Image: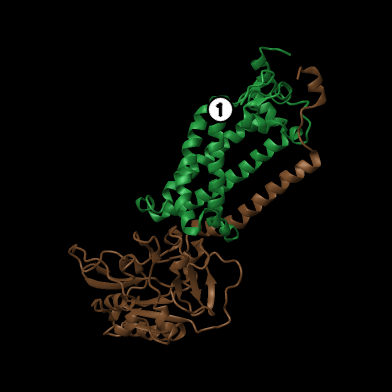
Chain colours: A green, B brown
Amino acid sequence: MKKDPEKLSRFTAAERANHWLSALTFILLALSGLAFFHPAFYPLNQLFGGGVWTRILHPFIGLMMAISFCVMFFRFRKLNTITQTDREWLGHVREMVDGDDRNMPEAGKFNGGQKVLFWLLVACMALLLLSGIVVWRAYFSFMFPVSVIRLASVVHAAGAAGMILLIIGHIYMAIWTRESMGAMLYGQVRRVWARQHHPAWFRQMTGGDK
Amino acid sequence: MALQSLDIQRRSATTTPPPGVRQTPKVAKLIDISKCIGCKACQAACMEWNDLRDDVGTTAGVYDNPRDLNENTWTLMRYAEVEPEKGTLEWLIRKDGCMHCADPGCLKACPAPGAVIQYSNGIVDFHEENCIGCGYCVTGCPFNIPRLSPKDSKVYKCTLCSDRVMAGLEPACVKTCPTGAILFGTKADMLHHAAGRVLDLKSRGFARAGIYDPPGVGGTHVMYVLQHADRPELYCGLPAEPSISPMVSLWKGAAKPLASLAFGMVAAGAFFHYVTKGPNEVSEETGKEGKK
């Protein structure tokens, strides 16, 4: 992809690939996992070649996502440190949701909402990985007493429901905030986009340029 | 797994009524432990009728053989040498296997439609062709009964000889028991008979004799007559108050509709936010100030 010098670089190719590998594995996991969660979603197993194949594949895809997510965690961990400005931003989040961003404190590369989302996703991922190993009947469940497996089943379902809800929100925010999808797809954003949505990051990138 | 397709009371992972036009009387197997001599004829009959042959194992110095239930052993004699009171030795022998709960934890936990079936006569049966091998039934069972076969990743357990019962026969273990310790009939008849046995045992000095038909799982369609009904754990860890774990009830109960509703609400909320508030675009003002 040819770089547009007028645009600001937001995500590197490696960051984008990492994000989309996590995203694709997440979609596959949500679809296959829902099949086991509620009978209404059971037909989704047909996407994976039937119930047995869905049961076989889900945990391996889960491992792929856990690894990809872990790499992403170390990539973005520092950028997601919550600061005083982020707390103020979160205090004004209601105005933001109403579509009025005039009084929002200046966000850096990520705003307070994105940072909270990041840490909630990290928590869900950790719970899903740990509980997922316990309920992986073919290789690991025999190592755990049934009470632990029962608890892990609840934790896995709760973690998954939490993650699905967070990702619905994440996808919607990307659609709602126009042009932000381009940042993750192509890596670049328009200067005005950066100036409006992430003013502190914009100044940092342009050296205080107004 | 058998052919009764019109007298189904409950079907796993199914939210609409299963075909249940045919109603059959509730049946039960009664195992009178006070009459059991531990001959294992029932275990052999089970293998024979169901064509199951476990691998020849090694002895561990006790009568329990094999050591545990497995995909080829659907019923197992468990031998306990206990002292219910100091200085009294008793050999309590329990025929272990599926209890056919009225409220089956396996069926509640199973995510595969029609892999676990409860017939109107109370028998809980696995239909292995629908089984996906997830092991959720093992997680759900309060009695630790289903066994996942490492060979085909399907779960197996006692069927209460649903195929024989359908044809009007008693289960193979009942047929073969030489002392009449295992009986089969309607649940009402079995309870009646068991009450007589309990009276008899009480008159013989077993003051705490009683029937094991645990209400925590809605009663069972396999019942025991116990000499020490106040202490079922004496019988190789028979649970005193079995019930579906609250964890399983939460996971396979409230969590399902609540989470599904939440998914729908959040997705709908996002959509209506978009159509009422409009997209969050780069404003004209910022555009004018900036270069591009």
User: Is residue B123 in sight in this rendering?
Assistant: yes
Circle 1: element type: helix
Q: Quadrant of residue B57?
A: bottom left
Q: Residues within 10 Å of mark 1 (few under 14, many from 20)?
A: few
- Residue sitting at 51 percent across and 62 percent down? B112
Asked if B22 appears above or below B109 in the picture, the reply is below
Name the residue nearer the viewer: B240 or B163.
B163
- Residue sitting at 71 percent across and 26 percent down? A197
Asked if B270 appears above or below B143 in the picture, the reply is above
**What x and y, as percent, mark residue A189?**
68, 25
Which quarter of the rendered picture does the N terminus of chain A lie within?
top right
- Residue sitting at 80 percent across and 42 percent down? B276
The chain letter for the residue carrying disc 1 is A
**What x and y, as percent, mark residue B120?**
52, 79
**What x and y, as percent, mark residue A90?**
68, 31
Asked if B44 appears above or below A152 in the picture, the reply is below
Q: Which residue is mark 1?
A: A13
Say which amino acid is labelled 1: Ala
